[in-house]
Image (tube, grey):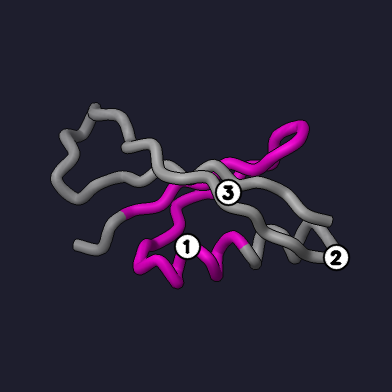
Amino acid sequence: MQRAVRLFVITKDRSPAGPPRAGETFSVEAATTDGLRDAVKAEVADRGLRIRSVSFGPKNLVAYAEEPA
């Protein structure tokens, strides 16, 4: 299965109550939902970010990640 992922990035200079920055949308593909989650984690790590959360929506996924300190 293939799903689109909407990435939001929490910047290191963000104020505590500030919103995350909307990042890009990318696709991942895997045979299972657990595989999709692992694929998102790998893709985010390849971008030099640290994953905070991955959520499954009705059709797509949403990921939140932090910039390294």
Q: Which amino acid does label 3 sit on?
A: Val
Q: Is residue 51 magenta?
A: yes
Above or below: residue 16 compared with residue 68: above
The residue sitting at 53% across, 66% down in the picture is 43
Residue 17 is marked as: none
Identify the residue under disc 3. 54
Mark 1 Cα-neighbour bin, 10 Å: few <14, some 14–19, many ≥20: some
Between disc 2 and disc 3, the foreground one is 2
Label 2 or label 3, whichever comes before in sequence order: 2
Q: Give the Cα distance between marks 2 and 3.
A: 17 Å
The residue sitting at 24% across, 29% down in the picture is 18
Residue 31 is marked as: 2
Identify the residue under disc 1. 44
Q: Give the Cα distance between marks 3 and 1.
A: 11 Å
Above or below: residue 57 compared with residue 1: above
Q: Do the residues labelled 2 and 3 touch (CB within 8 Å)?
A: no
Q: Which amino acid does label 1 sit on?
A: Val
Which quarter of the picture shows residue 30?
bottom right
Q: Which amino acid does label 2 sit on?
A: Ala
The residue sitting at 19% across, 62% down in the picture is 69
Label 1 or label 2, whichever comes before in sequence order: 2
Q: Are marks 3 and 1 in contact (CB under 8 Å)?
A: no
Q: Where is residue 60 drawn, in percent x and y?
A: 69, 40
Label 3 or label 1, whichever comes before in sequence order: 1
Q: Give the Cα distance between marks 1 and 2.
A: 19 Å
Label 1's element?
A: helix
Q: Where is residue 36 drawn, in percent x and y?
A: 71, 59
Q: Is residue 24 magenta?
A: no
Provide the residue span drawn in magenta: 40-66
